[in-house]
Amino acid sequence: MNVDLKKKGLEIALRFPELGGNAAVAFSKDASELCAQFNAFLKDLKESGTLDAIVDKWSSKCLDTVKPAVIPLPKEGKPLVVGTIASDAPLSMIVNNQWAGIEIEMMQLFGAYLGRPVQFQNYDFAALIPAVTSKRVDLAVSFIFITEERAQQVLFSDAYFFCESICLGKSGEADVSKNSFWQKVSDGFQKNLVQEDRWKLLV
């Protein structure tokens, strides 16, 4: 659990994995070679345990105590231009005028893997896919879930993270015993939105 939640007196009360999704990197449709390179890189990152270590570092500590990794990158050559969001902690953010976060370190390591400098560009989430399709960026990250609609516009990499939907509650009050308030909320949520597919109406 992220320590920042504890500092705010919160904890995870309910989990809804059914409403989660796989996050992947978005590439333009004609960037299959770059996408394949990323997938090979991602496979190594997972098997070595490096990706888990990065995620754990940024999600299990208070963000103001995490020190971004220093990843040596080439200073010359064609930069890898990455579209992302500057205020999406702990994924990507700017700390002390420097980019930092889970996806930032992953992209910096990918740049080192390719032998290319990395350049980050800040976008609103809704502008990320258009930035990829118009080739203003080489790729985009910011917990972009793989969906059929988006897959018609961009080429997705292999998933690097699965994110489940959660509900937060005050610390000490998130009792999920059978007869608890939170269990009733969970049961109602499951029945009305998940089992009966009413979540599609909200989408």
Image (cartoon, rainbow, N blue to C red):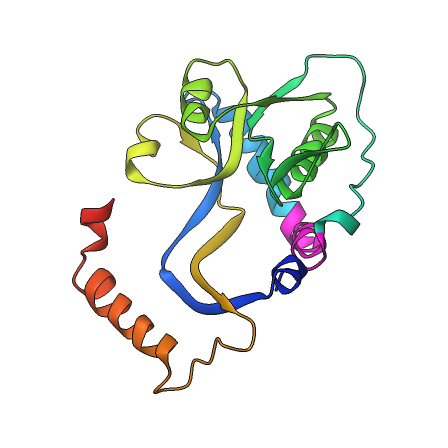
Residue 13 x/y as whole percent: 46, 70
Q: 198 above or below 93?
A: below
Q: Give the prevailing secondary structure in the magenta stretch.
A: helix
Magenta-highlighted residues = 45-62
Can residue 30 be seen here?
Answer: no
Position of residue 165 measured from the top left corner of the image (x, y, whole percent)? 41, 57
Instruction: Assess whether residue 100 is covered by the magenta stretch.
Output: no
Residue at 48% from the left image edge and 21% from the top image edge = 31
- Of 88 and 18, nearer the camera is 88
Asked where in the image residue 81 lies, by quadrant, the reply is top right
Q: How many marks?
A: 0
Residue at 73 percent of width and 20 percent of height: 117
Screen quadrant of the C terminus = top left
Let me know if residue 47 is in the magenta part. Answer: yes
Residue at position x 66%, y 50% from top?
51
Relative image position of residue 29 (x, y in whole percent):
40, 22
